[in-house]
Image (cartoon, grey):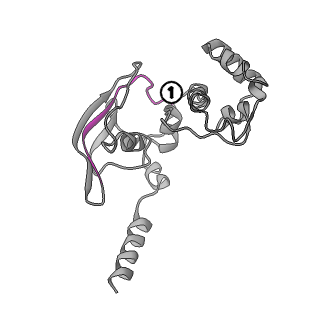
Amino acid sequence: SYHVFSCMKRFIDIYEYPTDQDYDMRTYTKSNLPSKEDIYFDNVDFKYEDNYIFSNTNFKISYNKINVLRGANGVGKTTAVYLLSKYYRVNKGMIKYGDLDLNDISTKLWRKKISICFQENYLFSGTVIENIRYGLREMTDKEIIKTNKLIGIDHFFSSLPNGYYTTITSKNINNYSLGRLISINRAILTKAG
């Protein structure tokens, strides 16, 4: 039947789609990748099935500047972040880091160079400091607290009932401010770049 054929075709498409490992076997992997480059969306096309999200799209993300993607729901803000993170690949055009095509940079190396804070943030059961440390397992409590003092956000966490050791519960797990601050804190502590 057509449904079986369509499912089989999708399975083959997914099976034959290059993995990050396939791309990384032929990409720029030097750890001394330039660190002070602008990022360019250069005539980028991207679509989900037949629905174009970007068509011949151009914009620049400036190094050492605050860059904001804004717009109405469904215009492609999250898709742009996924493309930038190399979770998706452009259909046409390229994303450039300086003069380099983003596809020529190792995915693993690239993701160490970027930090992203989404509007929606997720907290996990455990303490505040465990949530901050998510993805930063090598950092000690002392290093996290010291860094937060240096960047001026320690007072927020210290003012919680048990400070950094306040347990995330069903009452505070949906706290927008706490989630946002923890997400920003994670991004800063990754020392991307």
Q: Which residue position is annotated with label 1?
A: 193
Relative image position of residue 85 (x, y in whole percent): 44, 41
Give the vertical position of 179 relative to 19 (above or below): above
Relative image position of residue 129 (x, y in whole percent): 72, 30
Q: How many marks?
A: 1
| Mark 1 surroundings within 10 Å by alpha-carbon count, few (fewer than 14), some (14 through 19), many (20 or more) | some
Q: Quadrant of residue 175?
A: top right
Name, please, the residue furthest toward the front: 171
| Left or right placement of residue 51 versus residue 112 in this view | left
| Left or right placement of residue 4 versus residue 118 in this view | left
Q: Residue at x 48, y 35 (%)?
A: 119
Relative image position of residue 174 (x, y in whole percent): 61, 38
Viewer-proximal residue among 145 and 110: 145
Viewer-proximal residue among 11 and 103: 11
The amino acid type, in three-letter code, at marker 1 is Gly
Element at label 1: loop
Name, please, the residue furthest toward the bottom: 1
Relative image position of residue 70 (x, y in whole percent): 34, 32
Question: Does the magenta portion include 145?
Answer: no
Q: Where does the magenta region start and end?
A: 32-47
Q: Quadrant of the N terminus?
A: bottom left
Q: Residue at x 36, y 39 (%)?
A: 77
Q: Quadrant of residue 133?
A: top right
Question: Does the magenta portion include 36?
Answer: yes
Q: Residue at x 26, y 55 (%)?
A: 51
Give the vertical position of 83 relative to 20 (above or below): above
Q: Residue at x 33, y 43 (%)?
A: 76
Give the vertical position of 75 relative to 59 (above or below): below
| Left or right placement of residue 18 versus residue 182 in this view | left
Viewer-proximal residue among 30 and 113: 113
